[in-house]
Image: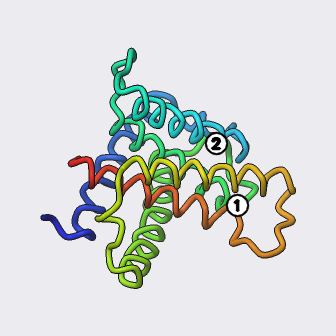
Amino acid sequence: MTATPAHYDQLLARCRQLFLAKTHDYGTAWRILRLPSVTDQIFIKANRIRTIQEVGNQQVEDSVDEEFVAIVNYCLIALMQLHLPADTPLDMGPDAVAAAYDHEAAENRRLLLAKNHDYGEAWRQMRVTSITDLILMKLHRVKQLENLGGAAQVSEGVEGSYRDMLNYAVFALILGGA
């Protein structure tokens, strides 16, 4: 069994490679998206995964693993959008995109390792279907926070939820044998 930090690094390298290849093809079109739109994109991916898990088959070839990779990348898009300065141009160069992606991925790695330490890798005993449900629950929380205009009273806010969903997607990929 690969250690969690090494597995995280392998999976994030795969996600990064795809993200940067898409950036080459599409530029930074994702910069147009407002956070609620990114949240909805994550919801579409997570809902499709749940539907496939419940129905047991699919009609579109994109695999469940590919959908979890998309969730990782959409969560990183959300985190980049949250943290890029307001005056960041819509069109970013490849080096700037890679630096922003790497920064957010490194922050998430740090969080994953800290939580993994405290929780004792309990996620390894979970079902992928439960992880899908946790992602969907976090999405509903984020939507509620977005509807409140960020006026949360006691929650961690949307950033923590995006980070958790990213890590849940990594866990699902690891458990699924990716």
Tell me where residue 129 appears, x and y as whole percent: 41, 47
**Relative to 41, is 13 above or below?**
below
Q: Quadrant of the N terminus?
A: bottom left
Classify residue 128 as left or right of residue 72: left
Classify residue 103 as left or right of residue 142: left
Residue 29 versus residue 140: which sits nearer the camera? 140
Tell me where residue 85 appears, x and y as whole percent: 70, 60
Residue 54 versus residue 72: which sits nearer the camera? 54
Mark on residue 38? Answer: 2
Q: Name the residue under label 1.
A: 85
Point 78% across, 53% down: residue = 144
Tell me where residue 96 appears, x and y as whole percent: 51, 53
Q: Tags 2 and 1 in contact by the CB under 8 Å rule?
A: no
Point 32% across, 73% down: residue = 121
Residue 12 versus residue 153: which sits nearer the camera? 153
Mark on residue 154? Answer: none
Q: Tell me the kind of residue under disc 2.
A: Val
**Relative to 72, is 3 above or below?**
below
